Amino acid sequence: MKGLEMRDVPEAGGSFGLVVLLGTAVWLGMAAGSWSGWPQLGVIEVLFLLAPWIVVPLATSLIPSLDDSQPLTGRQRASKWVIFAAAGLATFSFFMPAGMWAASFAGAWLLVCAVFALRGLRRLWRYRVHSFSQFCFAIGEAYLIVGGTWLVASRMGLQPVGFQEPIVLLTAVHFHFAGFLSAVLAGLSYERLRETRWSKPLGVALMAVVVGPGLLGLAFLVGPKVKLAAVMLIVIGQFGLATGMVRVALGIANPVGRAMLILSSGCVVAGMALAASWALGEYPLQPFVDLGRMERFHGALNAVGFGVCGLIGWMNASRGRGTAAVALWGRKD
């Protein structure tokens, strides 16, 4: 398959770096405040807000541009601040009663998600089946509009197809992290290892990472047996992604990048073990792990440990590669 040059991946810097820094400060303030009692945000809300403030801006900075690696234009720089503003409006929606006004504020984030989804469609049309990495990025971007739609439904107080809170907001979380973020990390991992002997088995595992979240969303409409199968597909795929990220980590010289990628891999393995336990319990309807524990432990492991640590690892991996993973693990014969 056709690949892409990792030098085409933009690095966070300038105004974009400032946007991420400010977003991190805002999210940390909200997380610390929620722990002490103000603002009154639950675990799910705090974990969701990690996506617009930190995860989406960082992850999209690592996705190769569709504009042939041209320098950022004024419009592209301005778009970073549009993301920042939309994150703020989505945050304000959680301090309003569920209804039209709250949904209107959350709708700003849905518009941002729609723009990324359109970019994903452009990416898919341009590369089709010629680049598996670009396929991962495209599907990940498309997942954002699903997550944004469920966010608006949550803030509107809707119960789509009979689902109630916290499932509605958890679905928004699912498609931002298990959907978008995992697909981006899958694409980055495959691109680093596509010239090695590990590319074919890794590609199979990463396909499960990319399509699994969508299948799981549909499985909730079918029944516990299909849901169990979809969760296990994601678990197997995420184990493969974790293995790939460790292989990448061992092949880079940057110590921060190496440590963060290994930590991220360990967190996703632990988080997926919890997910598997929950799914196995759901099938006989005797849950081994209740939803509250899943929110706190699985959510934190995936969102902060896997997500944020993984993104920091990839940011540092793209600076000073040192010994390339391709050289360490061997090219294809």
Image (tube, rainbow, N blue to C red):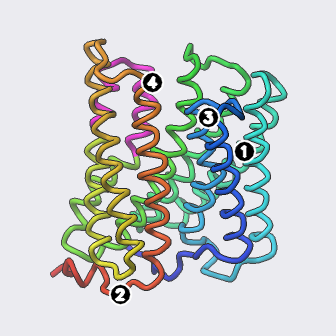
SS category of the residue bearing label 4? helix
Mark 1, Cα crowd under 10 Å, few <14 / some 14-19 / many 20+, is many
Is 197 left, or right, of 265 in this rendering? left
Taking the magenta stretch, the answer to whether it contains residue 141 is no
SS category of the residue bearing label 3? helix
Residue under numbered circle 2: 322
Residue under numbered circle 3: 45
Q: Nearer the viewer, mark 2 or mark 4?
A: 4
Q: Earlier in the sequence, mark 1 or mark 4?
A: 1
Could you say where residue 139 lies in the image, as x and y percent from the top left? Answer: 50, 52
Q: Are the residues tagged 2 and 3 within 8 Å (C-beta)?
A: no
Q: Earlier in the sequence, mark 2 or mark 1?
A: 1
Between residues 60 and 22, which one lies in front from this camera angle? 22
Task: Name which residue type carries label 2.
Answer: Gly
Q: Are the residues tagged 2 and 4 within 8 Å (C-beta)?
A: no
Residue under numbered circle 4: 292
Mark 3, Cα crowd under 10 Å, few <14 / some 14-19 / many 20+, is some
Give the main secondary structure of the magenta stretch.
Answer: helix
Quarter of the figure that contains the N terminus: bottom left
| Residue at the image point whose x is 28% and y is 65% from the top | 246
Q: Nearer the viewer, mark 3 or mark 1?
A: 3
Separation of marks 2 and 3 at Cα, in angstroms: 39 Å
Taking the magenta stretch, the answer to whether it contains residue 220 is yes
Q: Are the residues tagged 3 and 1 within 8 Å (C-beta)?
A: no
| Residue at the image point whose x is 30% and y is 86% from the top | 323
Residue under numbered circle 1: 109
| Residue at the image point whose x is 20% and y is 77% from the top | 329
| Residue at the image point whose x is 62% and y is 43% from the top | 32
Identity of the residue furthest to the front in this view: 36
**What's the magenta region?**
211-233
